Image (cartoon, rainbow, N blue to C red):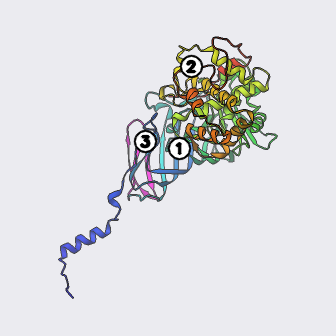
């Protein structure tokens, strides 16, 4: 046997090498964006979140928010550092119990460097302590934190989370939530899901809400103020929680006459889309100056302006339809926005038909006839409208006309099986326009790519003969009675 002599210096070097994980060289920073072409810096790479636990305290007088966010996630690559999307002031970050270093970058990035690199597939617990005045923060020149006379609201699309909790802010990374908020006695805190408990101590009341189904970050909402809260149960057994600001003025009656129909409309929509997918339903109407509504999961946000001209159950139908199309089944990338808005608009058309105020066919005819071939309306492709046109009227109206064209092409039997089957096929997950086209072909047994290309992707007015003549070329269609209410529905602000 030949015995090799190792010098002491070499032995020390070898020991040092053994102490370093073999995979350390493969660890790298997670991407500061999830890869969405419309919003390259939204979301983050390298991990997947399963749960957000938010413990907050809010003072309405000063708009000061304090919080501790505990984020449960799993790494999807070997990570040396990772980003969270956030704007408030951070005082401490811990990763798996150990203090981590952190810094800000870009418009809304919090860069976290763990004490020890994280291997792929590692369960991770991230704790972020923070505080700040959300109304003083902005990114890209805007804010989605809306001050009210007695508090504030977080509700916007495609971003809203940055102003109140750190997150992986993209719909493709859905998670469950616990949101616990302490506010001065007499103030309420409204959020998603079900109210688990309330407790009072030392002049403060804590409200704890739970969302037990996966939820996109932009669908998480927080409303802080003085509300009149109503509760009930739909005939189908869905708990309903609604809330109204106590200073809505002249819009109060119309708002209640609309939103209090939530239970009825959930049951009605269930007939088209299948069982309601969440543990509660409802909406809230704060005293804000915005002009839109938003499908925040289980607890829809409505601007008082939606009811300025009287009751508006059509907007309630639109936002509740999103609970299936957009919330339960969420988009993979923001270019897939037609899956959300086209079907929510079409639900309004079905409601119009139900109410005897114009059939879905008449409304499709009206859209087609209202826009001549040289109208810029037809240059927006609902299937991939571009970041600047993400919430263009064409995504809603041309998008709904595309759905009517599909119905005409495949017949009611297959069409309504698709409406109900789609949310079940992709329940609590994400899907794309391409996924929908494939599913529609499977259910109908017909090739549909040409139809969808014509209605969703070509930057031109479809020929009247496409699928079925919606109207004869050059003809006009009478405006259905429901059109003004439908047209007024602008469910997102969008940036």
Residue found 53% across the figure and 20% down from its top: 460
Give the mark nearer the N terminus: 3 vs 2: 3
Q: Residue at x 21, y 88 (%)?
A: 1
The percent position of residue 349, horizontal first and vertical second, equals: 71, 26
Disc 3 to disc 2, how far (Cα)?
A: 35 Å
Which of 241 and 147 lies nearest the eye of the viewer? 241
Residue under label 3: 33
Within the magenta stretch, is there residue 115?
yes
- Name the N-terminal-most of marks 3 and 1: 3
Specify start and end residues of the magenta stretch as a single range.
87-116
Q: Residues within 10 Å of mark 3 (few under 14, many from 20)?
A: many
Q: Secondary structure at mark 3?
A: loop
Q: Which residue is the extreme one toward the bottom?
A: 1
Rendered image quadrant of residue 416: top right
Q: Nearer the viewer, mark 3 or mark 2?
A: 2
Q: Return the mark for residue 172.
A: 1
* Circle 2 crowding by C-alpha within 10 Å: few under 14, some 14–19, many from 20: many
* Residue at 41% in and 56% down: 99
Image coords of residue 176 (percent x, y): 60, 49
Main SS of residues in magenta: strand
Gap in Å between the C-alphas at discs 3 and 1? 12 Å
Q: Magenta stretch: residue 127 in it?
A: no
Which residue was labeled with disc 2? 461
**Callouts 3 and 2 close, C-beta under 8 Å:** no
Q: Please, is residue 312 above or below residue 196 in the view?
A: above
**Among numbered discs 1 and 2, the one appearing first in the sequence:** 1
Relative image position of residue 195 (x, y in whole percent): 69, 45
Position of 62 relative to 482 (above/below): below
C-alpha span from label 1 to label 2: 32 Å
How many discs appear? 3
Q: Choose between 368 and 93: the one closer to the eye.
A: 368
Numbered disc 2: secondary structure: loop
């Amino acid at each position: 046997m030949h015995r090799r002599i190792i010098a002491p210096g070499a032995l020390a070097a070898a020991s040092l090498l053994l102490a370093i994980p073999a995979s350390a060289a493969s660890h790298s920073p997670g991407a500061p964006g999830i890869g969405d072409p419309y919003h390259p810096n939204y979301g983050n790479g390298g991990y997947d979140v399963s749960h957000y636990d938010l413990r907050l305290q809010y003072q309405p007088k000063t708009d000061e928010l304090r919080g501790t966010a505990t984020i449960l996630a799993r790494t999807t690559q070997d990570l040396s550092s990772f980003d969270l999307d956030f704007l408030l002031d951070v005082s401490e970050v811990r990763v798996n119990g150990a203090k981590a270093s952190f810094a800000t970058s870009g418009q809304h990035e919090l860069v976290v460097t763990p004490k020890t690199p994280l291997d792929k597939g590692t369960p991770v617990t991230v704790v972020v302590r923070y505080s700040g005045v959300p109304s003083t923060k902005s990114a890209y020149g805007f804010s989605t934190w809306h001050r009210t006379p007695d508090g504030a609201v977080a509700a916007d699309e495609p971003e809203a989370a940055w102003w109140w909790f750190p997150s992986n802010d993209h719909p493709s990374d859905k998670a469950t939530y616990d949101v616990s908020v302490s506010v001065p006695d007499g103030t309420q805190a409204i959020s998603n899901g079900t109210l688990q408990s309330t407790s009072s101590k030392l002049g403060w009341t804590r409200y704890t809400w739970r969302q037990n189904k996966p939820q996109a970050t932009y669908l998480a909402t927080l409303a802080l103020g003085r509300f009149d809260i109503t509760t009930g149960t739909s005939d189908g057994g869905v708990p309903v929680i609604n809330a109204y600001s106590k200073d809505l003025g002249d819009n109060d009656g119309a708002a209640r006459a609309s939103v209090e129909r939530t239970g009825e409309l959930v049951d009605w929509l269930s007939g088209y889309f299948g069982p309601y997918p969440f543990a509660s339903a409802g909406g809230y109407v704060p005293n804000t100056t915005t002009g839109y509504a938003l499908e925040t999961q289980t607890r829809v946000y409505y601007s008082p302006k939606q009811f300025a001209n009287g009751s508006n159950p059509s907007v309630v139908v639109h936002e509740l339809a999103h609970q299936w199309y957009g919330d339960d089944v969420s988009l993979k990338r923001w270019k897939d926005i037609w899956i959300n808005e086209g079907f929510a608009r079409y639900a309004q058309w079905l409601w119009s038909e139900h109410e005897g105020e114009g059939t879905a066919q008449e409304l499709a005819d009206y859209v087609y006839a209202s826009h001549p071939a040289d109208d810029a309306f037809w240059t927006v492709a609902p299937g991939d409208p571009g970041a600047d046109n993400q919430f263009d009227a064409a995504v809603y109206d041309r998008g709904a006309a595309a759905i009517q064209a599909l119905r005409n092409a495949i017949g009611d039997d297959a069409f309504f099986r698709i409406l109900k089957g789609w949310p079940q096929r992709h329940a609590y997950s994400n899907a794309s326009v391409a996924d929908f086209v494939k599913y529609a072909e499977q259910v109908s047994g017909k090739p549909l790519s040409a139809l969808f290309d014509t209605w969703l992707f070509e930057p031109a007015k479809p020929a009247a003969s496409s699928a079925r003549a919606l109207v004869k070329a050059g003809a006009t269609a009478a405006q259905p009675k429901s059109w003004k209410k439908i047209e007024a529905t602008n469910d997102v602000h969008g940036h």
